[in-house]
Image: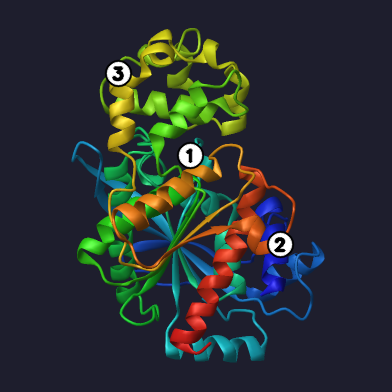
């Protein structure tokens, strides 16, 4: 598993990339979705070896990526056409030993990981869109599927993919949960209709980083009401408590990534029908319809905003935040109001500069000591790695994912024997 850590850091930082031609997509009949990428193991392995991301001795599975269409509901209960991606390991182009290994795994049943992606603002970054354009998944699906042999599931979220014309409902608890829960149900039906050997009655692991950590926790609460197939949840560095995060930002003189909090203010204003100028000052407020249209990345948006807190946020929010509708909605949308019955591993870096580690500490205390969750653990990444380094929010992600991949693989070994 130490090898997995090194591999995942390489993939997360650099992506798969490359210019190798994946060849023609094999004719595959799909029911209830669309085959958007079919990458043979040998071509993928050659590319990864050439980029020094794996050794020639490492096993690599091919993969098929399917875009799954489904319906969900937004924060106002309106039905929305949505999408997500399922990535499945294959033996196409694999060595005989890898093909036999996958055959055994398929006979036992493939484990699955639902990965809720982190903050994106450009539609081209949505999982199903990105794979359609590049023919390759990157980050989590490469590790979970091509190297570890899991089925990977990634919802696009409302505002991306099939629902790109809908406003993004950023850090809205209700629709964050529904977009994941409804996708999982659609994915189970898709697997059934297409003979995908998903193990043990469609059981799965649940994870996500940053916004994805928040989304996975929101989804877990809803899943536990009616679904017993969640094996374990491992939310990472999520903004579970939104009110103290906002207070922290508003108390600063400058922030390094203004797009995050500007997005919360903008999308909350749209979802709850308040003027955005109650939160964001001009001239920035007038730019946000364009900046958050789905055409621009976080880095591009940051360049158009100021890092100075008093220039970005309205005086109303700066000086009367405690009495504002904005604070009430942030409290309402926090995701620490239940006792998870599922085993939960909360992962966070001590050096996180965007979502402080203290947010996970406070959330853990609420889950365990106030609501009485009995099987929950908070893992400080640097302590696990036994390092004196302190990793920022961006630096933390590959280490956090690698730890979660290791935890899931170890649990799968116990449950499925491989």
Circle 3 or circle 1, nearest the eye: 3
Snapshot quadrant of residue 153: bottom left
- Judge by depth and name the residue closer to the eye, 221 or 293: 221
Residue 398 in the image, given as x and y percentages of width and height: 64, 56
Q: Which residue appears at 72% of the width and 56% of the height?
A: 19
Q: Is residue 415 above or below residue 134?
A: below
Residue 352 in the image, given as x and y percentages of width and height: 61, 43
Q: Describe the element under mark 3 as helix, strand or loop.
A: helix
Cα distance in 3D space between marks 2 and 1: 38 Å
Circle 2 or circle 1, nearest the eye: 2
Mark 3 is surrounded, within 10 Å at the Cα level, by few (under 14), some (14 to 19) or many (20 or more) other residues, namely few
State the count of labels.
Answer: 3
Snapshot quadrant of residue 299: top right
Residue position marked by numbered label 3 in the rendering: 323
- Judge by depth and name the residue closer to the eye, 200 or 359: 359
Q: Describe the element under mark 2 as helix, strand or loop.
A: loop
132 displayed left or right of 299: left
Residue position marked by numbered label 1 in the rendering: 123
On the question of residue 267 being in view, the answer is: yes
Q: Which residue appears at 63% of the width and 22% of the height?
A: 303
Q: Of the two numbered discs 2 and 3 on the same chain, state the one appearing first in sequence.
A: 3
Q: How is the image coloured?
A: rainbow
Q: Is residue 404 above or below residue 349?
A: below
Residue 61 in the image, given as x and y percentages of width and height: 61, 76
Residue position marked by numbered label 2 in the rendering: 386
Cα distance in 3D space between marks 2 and 3: 43 Å
Q: Are marks 3 and 1 in contact (CB under 8 Å)?
A: no
Residue 236 in the image, given as x and y percentages of width and height: 51, 53
Cα distance in 3D space between marks 3 and 1: 35 Å
Q: Of the two numbered discs 2 and 1 on the same chain, state the one appearing first in sequence.
A: 1
Q: Which residue appears at 62% of the width and 57% of the height?
A: 381
Q: Of the two numbered discs 3 and 1 on the same chain, state the one appearing first in sequence.
A: 1
């Amino acid at each position: 598993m130490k090898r997995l850590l090194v591999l995942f850091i390489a993939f997360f930082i650099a992506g798969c990339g490359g210019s190798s031609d994946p060849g023609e997509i094999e004719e595959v009949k799909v029911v209830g979705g669309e085959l958007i990428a079919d990458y043979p193991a040998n071509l993928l392995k050659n590319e990864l070896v050439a980029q020094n991301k794996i050794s020639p001795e490492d096993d690599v599975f091919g993969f098929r990526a399917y875009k799954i269409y489904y319906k969900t509901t937004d924060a106002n209960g309106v039905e929305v056409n949505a999408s997500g991606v399922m990535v499945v390991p294959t033996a196409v182009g694999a060595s005989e030993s890898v093909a036999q290994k996958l055959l055994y795994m398929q006979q036992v049943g493939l484990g699955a990981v639902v990965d809720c992606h982190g903050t994106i603002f450009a539609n081209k970054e949505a999982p199903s869109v990105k794979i359609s354009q590049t023919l390759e998944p990157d980050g989590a699906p490469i590790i979970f599927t091509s190297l570890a042999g899991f089925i990977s599931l990634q919802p696009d979220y409302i505002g991306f993919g099939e629902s790109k014309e809908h406003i993004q409902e950023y850090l809205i608890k209700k629709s964050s949960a529904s977009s994941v829960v409804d996708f999982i149900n659609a994915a189970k039906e898709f697997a059934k209709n297409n003979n995908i050997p998903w193990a043990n009655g469609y059981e799965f692991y649940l994870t996500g980083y940053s916004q994805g950590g928040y989304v996975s926790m929101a989804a877990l609460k809803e899943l536990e009401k009616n679904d017993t197939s969640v094996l374990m949840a491992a939310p990472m560095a999520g903004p579970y408590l939104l009110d103290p995060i906002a207070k922290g930002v508003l108390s600063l003189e400058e922030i390094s990534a203004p797009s995050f909090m500007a997005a919360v203010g903008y999308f909350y204003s749209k979802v709850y029908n308040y003027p955005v100028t109650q939160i964001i000052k001009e001239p920035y407020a007038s730019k946000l319809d364009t900046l958050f249209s789905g055409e621009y990345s976080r880095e591009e948006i940051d360049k158009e905003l100021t890092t100075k807190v008093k220039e970005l946020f309205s005086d109303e929010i700066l000086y009367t935040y405690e009495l504002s509708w904005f604070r009430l909605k942030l409290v309402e949308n926090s995701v620490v109001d239940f006792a998870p019955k599922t085993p939960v591993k909360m992962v966070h870096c001590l050096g996180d500069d965007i979502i402080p580690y203290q947010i996970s500490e406070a959330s853990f205390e609420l889950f365990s000591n106030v609501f009485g969750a009995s099987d929950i653990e908070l893992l400080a990444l640097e302590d696990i790695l036994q390092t004196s380094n302190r990793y920022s929010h961006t630096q933390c992600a590959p280490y956090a994912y690698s730890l979660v991949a290791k935890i899931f693989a170890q649990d799968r070994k116990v449950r499925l024997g491989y």
